[in-house]
Image (tube, rainbow, N blue to C red):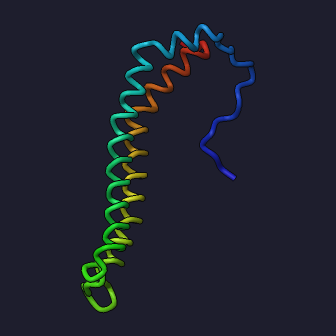
Amino acid sequence: MATETPPPPKTPVARPSAEEFVAVRESAEFGELRRSHRSFAFPLTVAFIAWYLLYVLLSNYAGDFMGTKLAGNLNVALALGLAQFLTTFLIAWWYARHAAAKLDPKAEAIKSRMEGGE
């Protein structure tokens, strides 16, 4: 079975002290990493929850609208329900791209510095 994870290092990795963790947590570099994550994740989370609640509210209070036929047996409720799945996968894909481009390089730099690689 193939894996992308490299084998564990032969030499033990240096363990940072508690003071080093605190210093990294308070660093500008780590602050930028957290801001980059939060500025992406929080708005998308709020938007998706609002979108989901809209679907639930429409299902409960706008039955006539949700029962409107679009084509054949496809109605608004089914179309919006399927759109929930689509948006879930799109957000996951978008986040993976964002993390690979913006978060992972910063996190890897911090990790390698903490482990004594730089």
State the image coordinates of residue 68 (x, y, percent, origin top left): 25, 84
Say which quarter of the image contains residue 35: top left
User: Against 96, is 67 above or below?
Assistant: below
Residue lying farthest to the bottom in this orientation:
72
State the image coordinates of residue 54 (x, y, percent, origin top left): 31, 63
Number of dots carrying numbers: 0
User: Against 98, is 54 above or below?
Assistant: below
User: Against 66, is 2 above or below?
Assistant: above
State the image coordinates of residue 49 (x, y, percent, origin top left): 38, 54
Q: Is residue 15 left or right of residue 83?
A: right
Residue lying farthest to the front in this orientation:
61
Q: Is residue 31 left or right of residue 22?
A: left
Q: Is residue 102 left or right of residue 5?
A: left
What residue lies at 64% left-to-right and 11% top-to-bottom?
A: 18
State the image coordinates of residue 4 (x, y, percent, origin top left): 60, 43
What residue lies at 41% left-to-right and 58% top-to-bottom?
A: 88
Say which quarter of the image contains residue 105: top left
User: Against 111, is 60 above or below?
Assistant: below
What residue lies at 74% left-to-right and 19% top-to-bottom?
A: 11
Question: Foreground residue, 81 or 16?
Answer: 81
